[in-house]
Amino acid sequence: MFDWLIVGAGFAGSVLAERIASQRNESVLLIDRRSHIGGNAYDCYNEAGVLIHRYGPHIFHTNAQAIVDYLSQFTAWRSYEHRVLSSVDGKLLPIPINLDTINKLYDLDLTSEQLEQFFASRREKVAEIRTAEDVVVSTVGRELYEKFFRGYTRKQWGVDPSQLAKSVTARVPTRTDHDDRYFGDTFQKMPAGGYTRMFHRMLDNPQIKIMLQTDYREIRDSIPFRRMIFTGPLDEYFDWRLGRLPYRSLRFEHVTLDREQFQPVAVVNYPQTEDYTRITEYKHLTGQQSRKTSLTYEYPTDIGDPYYPVPRAENEALYKRYEALAAECPDVWFVGRLATYRYYNMDQVVGQALATFARIQKSLPSRTVTQIPAQREAAE
Ligand code: FAD
Ligand code: UDP
């Protein structure tokens, strides 16, 4: 009998396995239907010896020192600030849109103050900012929205930005200075030995047993456990009984080229052309030296593994109905991007898992409280 069954060995499941094993000294069976731990953050060396991310580029960034401190128990860090270029009108331009983006796009020489006025003259008045389109047109105007956001978003999500929640494009800021970093967070670093190595260290505890290539459905009736943490898709847990929660998927095309470098930065976005959304070149992220280079092309699709919850009002409403079912399962904790249907970054999932652990500690007194001998005798 395991104390806990944890379904999914991504950040959500692995952080909770680590906490439960190390802090409560309880036994955990951690399963994943994939052949590896790490969830979508999994990285590995390919046949050319280049470290790649199997599920697209994962860059760690956060403002939460507590999350950095927690993960730093399992990894050292390599400084890396992410930069992205967007292929627009035949030029490679910084995204998020900044002063250099506009000056290069329109062959101008604006100052930051002039750029403020430039945006002010182009931005549209939107009574209430509700959608992913509203966010952008009310900041930089329709022309830049069309060039940088509309096509990319339609490819990525399969729907028009006017049909998506504002939170989607609000992830990407607009700047009037030269700052060309993709993220503004205080901590931007990559796990020095990669994500998978960090996960191995996290899960290196005799109380944790790992079973890969194992779906929850295959073992739920045969392996006994007391409590469960579920980090897979929420609708799947309930056999889709209220209908399907839409998750967007991606097809990853991994290629290796016999040359040192392919593009000037780790990621180039394609909002106007191509069927893929972006190309990632991993050596920029990892700092690895090699005569070869490995890339990933991302093709969005509805078919395949679930990667992204699709933030729109009707989906949120269906999620709420599933959440009500989840609330009726007292011995099951639902955690992570798929089970809580949240477009969370890695640090947010770690934060959510640590918060869940704090709730577990509060609601379930640990079985293995250390007793002084006199107490033990009295208990016996
Ligand atoms: P997952 O990593 O999805 O793990 C869930 C695991 O559960 C999976 O391994 C799955 O196989 C398993 N599972 C599901 N159902 C079952 C079942 N029935 N039985 C057994 N196992 C099951 N975040 C960042 O912070 N920075 C980035 O740069 C970044 N880039 C990203 C790029 C892409 C292309 C994607 C898709 C995501 C990116 N993210 C990024 C988000 C990041 O991947 C997630 O925040 C994080 O991996 C979520 O962890 P999780 O444990 O909730 O889910
Ligand atoms: N986006 C866009 N053009 C870009 C970059 C982003 O339209 O060049 C939009 C798109 O809808 C995307 C969202 O902004 O899904 C969030 O971008 P982010 O880079 O955070 O996406 P992720 O890395 O999570 O796929």
Image (cartoon, helix red, strand yellow):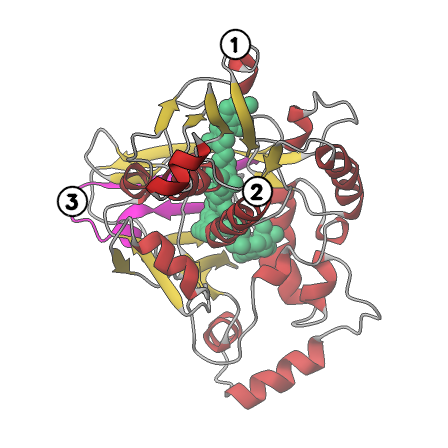
Q: In the image, which residues are magenta?
A: 278-300
Precedes in sequence: disc 1 or disc 3? 1
Report how many numbered discs are placed on residues in the image.
3
Q: In percent of the image, x 72 and y 59: which residue is there? A: 133
**Position in image of residue 232 (x %, y %):** 57, 31
* Left or right: 46 as drawn, with respect to 357: left
**Position in image of residue 309 (x %, y %):** 63, 41
Q: Nearer the viewer, residue 224 or 80?
A: 224
Does 19 appear above or below 325? Answer: below
Label 2 C-beta lies within 8 Å of the nearest ligand 1 atom: yes
Q: CA distance from mark 2 to mark 1?
A: 27 Å
Q: Nearer the viewer, residue 372 or 280?
A: 372
Question: Secondary structure beneath disc 3?
Answer: loop
Is residue 286 part of the magenta span, yes or no? yes
Q: Which residue is mark 1?
A: 222
User: Label 3 is placed on what type of residue?
Assistant: Ser
Q: Which residue is mark 2?
A: 337
User: Label 1 is placed on what type of residue?
Assistant: Ser
